[in-house]
Amino acid sequence: MRSCAKAIIRSLRLGSLEERARIGALVRPGYGYCTYFAADLAKRLGRKRITVVELGVAGGRGLLQLEQHAIEVEKALSIKIDVVGFDTGEGLPRPVDYRDLPYIWQPGFFKIEADVLRKRLSRAELVFGDIAQTLPTFLSAQDDCSVGAIMVDVDYYSSTMATFTAIERNVEKLLPRSFFYFDDVVGDHQHLYSEFTGELGAINDFNKTHEDLKFSAPPHLFHKAAFEPWASQIYVLHAFEHPLYGEFAGHTQPQLPLR
């Protein structure tokens, strides 16, 4: 019943975009949630433009949907959103060690059809190469506080850690609380993800070794996780030393009068 109601809301576009993003009544709800609320935070911090990123484009369906989310959020919030997709261009590289889960991933998986995808893209930029080189270069060229959301679909522990290395060296380019969607943290009985391997392992190891940067699963989404996997795939990177971390970003300053 719950899924049927949500499908109706999604197909008929009932309610505001904010409400549909909040309850997950969108195609690829994790992408939509991160895009909407990153843009919402950026606007409350006085930003007029943000970038949303997908790492690991593969077939391209995710990047196409990210474009659509960006278009809709732009209209709803009057903020410009750039979309960039990163990919090796050759599929998955060779696993480095057991943490890259070679029992489920192999070199060459998810090779992109770049020419086919480019014909369907309306605004997204494609960047090809090893993200250990391409992502730091890209981030360093961005304006401060301009990257709002990153969709991480790189599968491997090693590739996820390369992503985190690029981010920590350019953290001022992100929002003080930036939104991340990790595609490979739920899985099934074949994936058997754990906190010691893959993207989950990278998140845990990063948190253990950083005091002022922490990935946190938003508690307000916990109640959705049992029924909606996307709610378990969203994390927020808190950059405690970011110059805007303490900047007031609430919609209102509530008062509670005694009556």
Image (tube, rainbow, N blue to C red):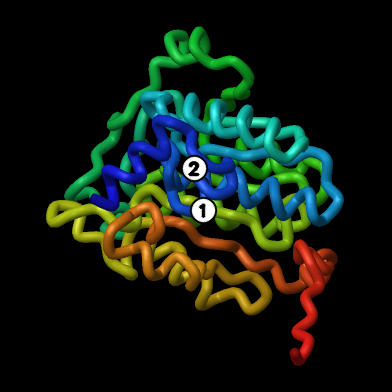
Quarter of the image with the C terminus is: bottom right
| Left or right: 258 in relation to 135 | right
Q: Name the front one of labels 1 and 2.
A: 1
Disc 1 on helix, strand or loop? helix
Residue at 38% in and 69% down: 223
- The mark found on residue 22 in the picture is 1
Q: Quadrant of residue 70?
A: top right
- The mark found on residue 156 in the picture is none
Q: Is residue 87 visible?
A: no
Instruction: Identify residue type, mark 2.
Output: Tyr
Instruction: Identify residue type, mark 1.
Output: Arg
Disc 2 on helix, strand or loop? helix
Counting from the top left corner in percent of width and height, residue 188 is at: 18, 54
Counting from the top left corner in percent of width and height, residue 128 is at: 54, 26
> Mark 2 or mark 1, which is nearer the start of the sequence?
1
Rate crowding at label 1 as few (under 14), some (14 to 19) or many (20 or more) other CA atoms within 10 Å. some
| Left or right: 191 in relation to 11 | left
> Between residues 36 and 94, which one lies in front from this camera angle?
36
Q: Quadrant of residue 109?
A: top left
Counting from the top left corner in percent of width and height, residue 141 is at: 78, 38
Which residue carries the number 2 mark?
31
Above or below, 14 relative to 168: above
| Left or right: 175 in relation to 94 | right
Rate crowding at label 2 as few (under 14), some (14 to 19) or many (20 or more) other CA atoms within 10 Å. many
Residue at 32% in and 53% down: 100
What whole-number distance in Å separates the C-alpha atoms at marks 1 and 2? 12 Å
